[in-house]
Image (cartoon, grey):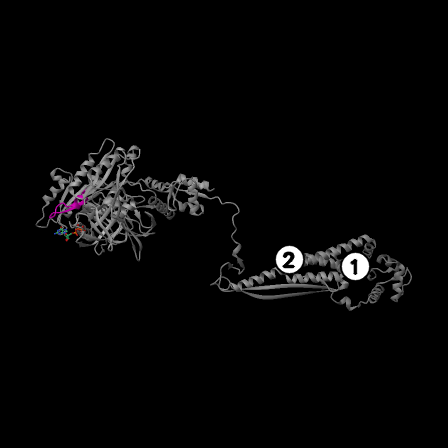
Amino acid sequence: MSDKTVRQLAEVVGIPLERLLEQLKEAGLSAHAPDDVINEDEKVKLLAHLRKRHGKPTGEADAAPKRVTLKRRTVSELKQSSAPGSSAKTISIEVRKKKTYVKRTEVATVADEPKESEEIIKTEEATPAQPMPVSAEHPPISAVAEEKAVRIEEELFEREEPVVEAVSSAVTVGDMAVADSEVIDEAALTETQATELRKENERKARLSESERKKEEEKKRRLEAAVEKNAEKVRQLAAARIESQKKKRQGQTAGKGKKKGKQKDKNGAQTDLKHQFEKPVAPVIKEVAIPEHIIVSDLAQKMSVKAAEVIKQLMKMGMMATINQSIDQETAVLLVEEMGHKAIMQSDDDLEAEILAALKEESSQEMSRAPIVTIMGHVDHGKTSLLDYIRETRVAAGEAGGITQHIGAYQVITDHGSVTFLDTPGHAAFTAMRARGAELTDVVIVVVAADDGVMPQTKEAVEHARAANVPIIVAINKIDKPQANPEKVMQEMSTINVVPEEWGGDVQFIKVSAKTGEGIDDLIEALILQAEILELTAPVEGSASGIVIESRLDKGRGAVATILVQRGMLEKGQFVLCGHEYGRVRAMFNENGKTVKDAGPSTPVEILGLSGTPNAGDEFLVVQNERAARELAEHREDKSKISRMAAQQAAKLDQVFSKMATGETASLNLVIKTDVQGSLEALRESLIKLSSDEVEVKVVYGGVGGINEGDVNLALASGAILIGFNVRADTAARKLIEEKDVDLHYYSVIYQAIDEVKSSISGMLAPEIKETIVGLAEVRDVFRSPKFGAVAGCMVVEGFVKRNLPIRVLRENVVIYEGQLESLRRFKDDVAEVKMGMECGIGVKNYNDVRVGDHIEVFERIEVKREL
Ligand SMILES: Nc1nc2c(ncn2[C@@H]2O[C@H](COP(=O)(O)OP(=O)(O)OP(=O)(O)O)[C@@H](O)[C@H]2O)c(=O)[nH]1
């Protein structure tokens, strides 16, 4: 830095020459003329003098730090208990605060150093959590603003924006105050300082009155803005404190009650109260409609109440209950009416697809073992025969194997193998058939050589014929001295089962289940029959077959015995059995031995199903679990529908309409009568009704009450049940009701003939119809001198009316028809007694009522003829 004259210095600093000379004089410096030279030392002296005059320390003041920055760092820990069961977390919280204090004299420099000042502001903006620089000697306005900003900032650490604004404004106000308080004569004596001071003085000199006003206005506005921001922040802080207070109160009040509020993972409180938002627009759903759908299911699919659906159906002119099944077309209309989109679905799409895929797997057909069912009259030796075969044939080859009853077993002979269904009797056979399982290839009818043909022998033959299955007759107990095989052959011939040696087509084998005589011949006969039938099945590819029986085992879960009909079943495959499905976890044969696969005609026990399927259910192997589950669900739906939808069992009053549409060309009947004579008479008269259009077939005719087997047979062969002076027993009634089988009772032959005739000729319905209104069970019989025998009865169905006609039934056969003489409850005569009540019944002109008899009360109703 070079020495300057007083004049030059005055020019540089921008003050009048006279004033500078005066100041030099005051400082006691030698220079007193404009052209005197002032060296560096003199300049410093002049500056010191000027500072002294303004009351500022010299020397150390320069050495003292110009700005002090205080940094504070606090570290605290927060214990955070998270979800129950997991350990508490510790969160470290570090709070950093920074305050910078700038000396007043330095403020001028700060003002002169816009770069640095800007930097500070920028830092504040970038790290809003850090407090702003604070000037210790700021004028009141800026100090207040700054203080507010700092306080607010401390109060609300994270509320960035308003604080930043406040801080920035405060800083700006502060800077301006610094500029205002500038003292010109304190100009630095260095060249730069002098230049800058001069510029500032020039700027100040240029400031007009109006500009000053503007500046003031700006200052005021800024102050107002700061105040406004501060107010906003205060409100926010107050709101936050208030809400925290409320939460704390809620927590204390709701201790032990977790409802409504939940802690999320981070421990933050989440109020569930406001999570659900009511939809503002109606939700349009895509509703898949199968061929039949139950009202309640449809309602569920549309997420509406069933009552809404019923109401809508009523509007459409249809009365329906919640459990009623409605057809696809109605459902589609309804769904669209209710504003949703209906998608029609075919029930059998999926099933048909899978079955078609199974059929496509064409594999080579090989001959298979015949599947045999044994039938016969009680005690003629069905079980003995089965046991003998199993024990000698099955266990023989499997030493140590525990023979189990699994419902079926296979016998291996020199000529081939035979599969026996271990469910003897025509009841099981017909029940299977009624479920649609045509399983048996051959029926063995067992007839005891000492007893001959009995009613159940005939039944067995009828059932086998109805199923179109060939018969082999086993004349059993030939070891007995009174055995008479010839008599058996003769009697069998009368029911059209003619032995081969007599020119017929049925093999008759003489056996003894006791000694084992003839058993080999019987098996050979079976194999021969199988050869005639040319029984074949594919031995490879996906397996399918029938469930024979199933049970729930304590340790193993659902166990099902299945008979493979085609393909090869392997362990680990997914199977579908009726409504159940699952992966075959293990397979066992009849000896309890584990097997890995099972081919056609092989019975196996399988484990791994979701539940116990029904005997007669079909099983098949499917590709994966998903397909198995979907199909099982579909089948379940279908069976639910079919249970609820009107059953399509054969109906006498529908025969003509079905004939007209070409649906049927035959009328099948199952007839049960009180005596053999009426059976023959009825059978002949009914068969004679056959015409060119329709054939009347008596599938089965027997004597005695109607039992479950008769109902199953009617179901299996689509027949109508006729009870002539006989009634159905309890089990049969239950099944009739469940399956909606058409049952007709008659007590006069011509009436039965008339009705069948009119049904097949499409004639008008008969005028009089009979309805059974009540049934009473005889529990005791008293003798009364006035009424004779009085039956102490319990009304078990409907009601008993004094003036209605009655019938007395013994073992479900009508033994008397007449009227009531008396009807009493305790000693009073009454007109009517309802179900569940006891009463005394006197039957007019009949004194042979016995304990166990039933008294049936019926009504004859006149039916209007309809054209
Ligand atoms: N002597 C002799 N007795 C036999 C023979 N077969 C069976 N029995 C006997 O006849 C009786 C009835 O035999 P079951 O095998 O129980 O007859 P079922 O036909 O199975 O009888 P249900 O199961 O009641 O229908 C038993 O006492 C047997 O011991 C045989 O070949 N000879």
Residue 609 image point, x, y percent: 33, 51
Query: What residue is shown with label 1?
Result: 180
Quarter placement of the C terminus: top left
The residue at label 2 has a CB less than 8 Å from ligand 1: no
Q: Quadrant of residue 34?
A: bottom right
Neighbourhood count class around disc 1 (C-alpha, 10 Å): few under 14, some 14–19, many 20 upward: few
Q: Which residues are magenta?
A: 444-461
Q: Residue at x 21, y 34 (%)?
A: 689
Q: Is residue 128 visible?
A: no
Q: Furthest residue to the top? A: 692
Residue 823 image point, x, y percent: 23, 51
Query: What residue is shown with label 2?
Result: 160
Nearer to me, 72 or 704: 704
Q: Is residue 68 above or below residue 528?
A: below
Nearer to me, 290 or 383: 290
Residue type (three-letter) at the residue carrying disc 2: Glu
Magenta residue check for 202: no
Nearer to me, 528 or 344: 344
* Secondary structure category for the residue under label 1: helix
